[in-house]
Image (cartoon, helix red, strand yellow):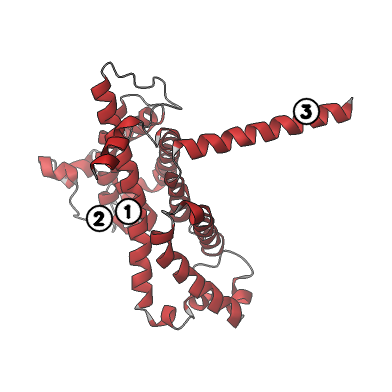
């Protein structure tokens, strides 16, 4: 155990992908702010029936939810500024923490429209507070003056990255366990009801697929198989890529067939945390060489 902890001090294994994911989080949150702006009076300010009394982190320090709702426009502006600052790495860890607080506040103000992706994203933003994701796509990357500070930052970054992976595995595992206890999943007919539902009719082919017994049976049990095996197999290098690809295909199919785009995009993007810097950089180098060779061949063919 001590040897593993010592290895986590050497380098930030998630500096490449966490930087990419930081930008994704900000674009994702910016999109939510822009899309909800036209309905803010309904879902945030409390002028109509969606008012809730859920507490948030601000209430823990004596700021009431009603006060937040009354001054929502100011809060929303601060939220927008924090998202932009975090995207460009301004303020770094402090900005990340403040953004987490406001993500929690916003979700508590409007919990009725949240989905599983939103719930998971809040925890991921909390993990990002501890990750040094500022080596790339940041105005100023962090420069540590002391080796001890850099090693401590590496330790926290790696532990937070591993926590994201473990959290994702727990989500899949618990989802599978609950499905096994549901008759429609256990009997292999769950996707029939999903594909038949008008609410989730993402393509003109949903009803056609629902009428095919083989596809219904296969899609139901494949979903269970992926979710129950993912938490155990994704840690092994030999099968990791296959497991991740299967999970991505699962989420893509849900996004296309059920129109749950945000939910699935969050889960797809989280898959990247299972690949450390070395794996990502090696793959990028391979692609760079491949593109370079292709360009050279094209030049030779033209001459």
Q: Is residue 85 left or right of residue 245?
A: left
Q: Quadrant of residue 87?
A: top left
Q: Quadrant of residue 205?
A: bottom right
- Whole-number angstrom distance, CA of label 2 to CA of label 1: 31 Å
The answer to whether residue 205 of the structure is visible from this angle is: yes
Residue ID for mark 2: 51
- 239 to 121, vertically: above or below: below
Instruction: Point out the residue furthest to the top here.
Output: 145
Q: Residue at x 34, y 42 (%)?
A: 161
Residue 127, position in %: x, y? Answer: 30, 42
- Whole-number angstrom distance, CA of label 2 to CA of label 3: 62 Å
- 163 to 180, vertically: above or below: above
Q: Quadrant of the C terminus?
A: top right
Residue ID for mark 1: 167
Q: Residues within 10 Å of mark 1 (few under 14, many from 20)?
A: some
Residue 299, position in %: x, y? Answer: 82, 27
Residue in front for this viewpoint, 102 or 271 = 271
Q: Residues within 10 Å of mark 2 (few under 14, many from 20)?
A: some
Q: How many marks?
A: 3
Give the secondary structure at mark 3. Answer: helix
Residue ID for mark 3: 296
Q: Quadrant of residue 91?
A: top left
- 270 to 143, vertically: above or below: below
| Upstream in sequence: badge 2 or badge 3 | 2
Proximity of marks 2 and 1: CB atoms separated by less than 8 Å: no
Residue 38, position in %: x, y? Answer: 42, 45
| Upstream in sequence: badge 2 or badge 1 | 2
């Amino acid at each position: 155990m001590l040897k593993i902890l010592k290895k986590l001090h050497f380098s930030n294994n998630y500096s490449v992908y966490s930087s990419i994911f930081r930008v994704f989080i900000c674009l994702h949150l910016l999109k939510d702010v822009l899309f909800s702006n036209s309905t803010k009076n309904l879902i945030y300010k409390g002028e109509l029936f969606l008012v809730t009394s859920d507490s948030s982190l601000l209430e823990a320090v004596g700021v009431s939810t009603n006060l937040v709702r009354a001054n929502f426009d100011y809060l929303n502006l601060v939220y927008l500024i924090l998202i932009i600052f975090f995207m460009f790495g301004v303020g770094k860890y402090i900005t990340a923490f403040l953004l987490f607080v406001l993500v929690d506040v916003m979700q508590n103000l409007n919990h009725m429209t949240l989905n599983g992706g939103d719930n998971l994203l809040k925890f991921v933003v909390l993990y990002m507070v501890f990750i040094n994701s500022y080596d790339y796509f940041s105005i100023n990357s962090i420069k540590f003056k002391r080796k001890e500070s850099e090693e401590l930052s590496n330790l926290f970054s790696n532990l937070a990255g591993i926590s994201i992976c473990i959290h994702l595995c727990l989500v899949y595992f618990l989802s599978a366990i609950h499905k096994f206890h549901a008759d429609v999943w256990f009997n292999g007919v769950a996707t029939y009801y999903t594909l038949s539902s008008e609410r989730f009719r993402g393509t003109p082919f949903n009803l056609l697929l629902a009428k095919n017994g083989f596809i219904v049976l296969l899609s139901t049990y494949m979903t269970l198989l992926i979710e129950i095996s993912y938490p155990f197999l994704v840690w092994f290098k030999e099968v990791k890529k296959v497991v991740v690809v299967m999970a991505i295909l699962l989420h893509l199919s849900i996004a296309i067939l059920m129109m749950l785009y945000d939910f699935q995009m969050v889960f797809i993007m989280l898959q990247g945390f299972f690949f450390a810097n070395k794996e990502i950089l090696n793959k990028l180098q391979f692609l760079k060489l491949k593109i370079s060779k292709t360009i050279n061949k094209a030049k030779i063919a033209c001459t």
